[in-house]
Amino acid sequence: MPRNIIIDTDPGQDDAVAILLALASPELRVLGLTAVAGNVPLPLTQLNALKVCELAGRPDIPVFAGCAEPLARRLVTAEHVHGKTGLDGPDLPAPKMRLQDRHAVDFIIETLRREPSGTVTICPLGPLTNIATALQKAPDIAPRIHEIVLMGGAYFEVGNITPAAEFNIYVDPEAADIVFKSGIPLVVMPLDVTHKALVTRPRVEAFRALGTRTGIAVAEMTDFFERFDIGKYGSEGAPLHDPCVIAYLLQPHLFTGRHINVEIETSSELTLGMSVADWWRVTDRAANALFIGDLHAEGFFGLLTERLARL
Ligand code: RIB
Ligand code: CA
C-alpha cells in the first residue's frame, strides 16, 4: 500500500531532486505539491513546482500555490544560492499544466479531513508557513497527520543563512515554532545530516550518465547548486538537503538520529530561527522530534540515482 504524502516546497534545485525522487518511487503516493515562498518568491516556486512535475512526466500531480509571505516577517530569499529563477542550471520549458485553483492551505486541510486519520505524511522542504497556517486555521487536522518529515534546522552544523539559523527555519521562525510545538510526530533533517549528503563530482556525473532528460537536468541543477557551497564551505560538492526527507521515507535505515527536544528561537535578533536541539538531553524538556544526525551517503546516492533512472 503506497504511503500518502503531501510535499510542501520552495523549489530550489534540491527541492526539485526531492520531488523527482518521490515521483519515481512507487512506495509513495504524492497527493499534491504545495508551493511556498522561500528560496525565491511564490510566483517562481509555484512555477518551478509545475516545471518539475512535467520534467518527471507527471502533469497529473496537483500543484497548489500557498503563502507568499512568512506569518509575521518580511520574506528573505536565497537567489544567491539558487539563481534568479530559483531553478537555474537546466533550461526547463514553460509548463503546460496549470496550478490548481484552491489555496495550498485549503488543500492541506481538506486532504487531512478527507483521508483516513493517520494515513497522510506531510513533507515540508521549505519555510513552514503553509503548514503553520493550516494548523492555525484547522487545529482539528493535527491529530490526523501521521507524521511531519521536514528539512530544516541545525545543531552541530549551526547556521547557513545566519551564524545561528538554517534557512527554512529562519525565514519563518513563528511558523516553525507552531509546528515544533504542535505535538505532531516530527522527523527533522537538519544541516547536521544534509551536510553529509554532498553531491560530489562523481555523483553529478552518475546523474548525467543516466543519459535521460531527467538525469541530465538533475546534473545541470546540481552543477549550478554546488558552485555556491564549494565557494562557501570549500566542500567537495554541495549538500543535497531536501532529498534526505524523501529518502528517509523510502529507506529510513540509511539514517540515524535521536528523539530529543527541539525548540525554535523567535525573539532574539542575534539567534532568530535557531533550532535549539537538546542533543545531550541536559534539560527536562519533553522530546518532540527525531533529530537526524547522520546518514549512509553511498546508500543515499545509490538509491537516488537508481530511482532517477526510472523517470
Ligand atoms: O537550508 C537549506 C534549505 O533551504 C533547503 O530546503 C533549500 O532548498 C532551502 O529551502
Ligand atoms: Ca527547500
Image (cartoon, rainbow, N blue to C red):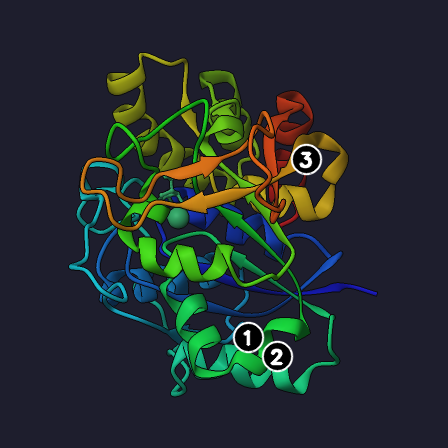
In the rendered image, which residue does mark 2 sit on? 112
Quarter of the image with the N terminus in it: bottom right
Q: CA distance from mark 3 to mark 1?
A: 24 Å
Is 28 placed above or below 162 here? below
Looking at the rendering, which quadrant does residue 93 occupy?
A: bottom left
Whether residue 270 is visible, yes or no, is yes
Q: Which residue is nearer to you in this view: 160 or 138?
A: 138
Inter-mark Cα distance, 3 to 2: 29 Å
- Specify the amino acid type for callout 1: Asp
Depth check, mark 3 against mark 1: the one in front is 3
Label 3 element class: helix
Amino acid of disc 3: Leu
Marked residue nearer the N-terminal end (2 or 1): 1
Q: Residue at x 62, y 23 (%)?
A: 297
- Residue 188 in the image: state x and y as whole percent: 55, 43
Total numbered badges shown on the rendered structure: 3
| Label 2 crowd (10 A; few <14 / some 14-19 / many >=20) | many
The x and y percentages for residue 111 are 59, 81
Q: Is mark 1 within 8 Å of ligand 2?
A: no
Question: Label 1: which residue?
Answer: 60
Mark 3 or 1, nearer chain start: 1
Q: Is residue 57 above or below residue 290?
A: below
Mark 3 or 2: the one toward you = 2
Check residue 303 in the rendering and tell me which mark sits there, or answer none. 3
Residue type, mark 2 in image: Leu
Q: Report ligand 1 position as a quadrant.
A: top left
Mark 3 Cα-neighbour bin, 10 Å: few <14, some 14–19, many ≥20: some
Residue 232 x, y percent position in the rendering? 25, 19
Q: Is residue 227 left or right of residue 213?
A: left
